[in-house]
Amino acid sequence: MTISERQEELIGEFEFFDNWEDRYEYVIELGKSLPEMPWEKKTDDKLIKGCQSRVWLDVRAEEGKLFFEADSDAILPKGIAAMLVRIYSGQPMTDIMKSDENFIAKIGLQEFLSPTRANGLLAMLKQIKYYALAFSAKK
């Protein structure tokens, strides 16, 4: 699936919920389904700067695609990280760099995230795009 197809799939899942409390709970459930990152990968260089909680993002490149692994010490950021890993992991670097983030508004995340959580989400997205740019420059 492409990034936009994965975004549309996620948007469709959130359309089932009538209120922000249900969406909030779903984000938490997504976080619970994210595999825990091994402790040896939870290093300071993998911490996302700008997040209120501690969020780690690890990446590896393989055949022009990036594969992400994430974890957090807080359940809501872990759910947000799970959404982003689901959308961007396994995607070509060029597609990651040119993708848009309109799915965030369509899901309604901005309705229930505090300003600090919203900043954390943007920091995660920025780091994912930075990795795509950095790894594509190494080619």
Image (cartoon, grey):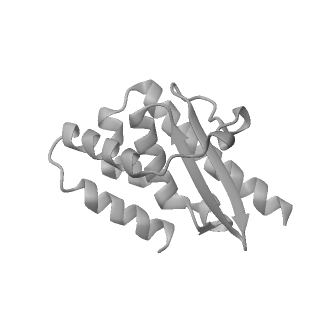
Query: Which residue is found at the position 26% from the left and 41% from the top?
Result: 25
Is residue 88 visible from the viewing direction of this image? yes
- Residue furthest out toward the left: 18
Q: Position of residue 15 (x, y in %)?
A: 22, 56
| 42, above or below 50, in the image | below
- Residue furthest out toward the front: 39
Along the viewing direction, whichever of 75 and 19 lies nearer the viewer: 75
- The answer to which quarter of the image holds residue 49 is top right
Query: Which residue is found at the position 55% from the left and 47% from the top?
Result: 70
Q: Quadrant of the C terminus?
A: bottom right
Q: Position of residue 114 (x, y in %)?
A: 38, 26
- Residue furthest out toward the right: 138
- The answer to which quarter of the image holds residue 44 is top right
Along the viewing direction, whichever of 4 and 33 lies nearer the viewer: 33
Is residue 101 visible from the viewing direction of this image? no
Query: Which residue is found at the position 70% from the left and 52% from the top?
Result: 131
| 1, above or below 29, in the image | below
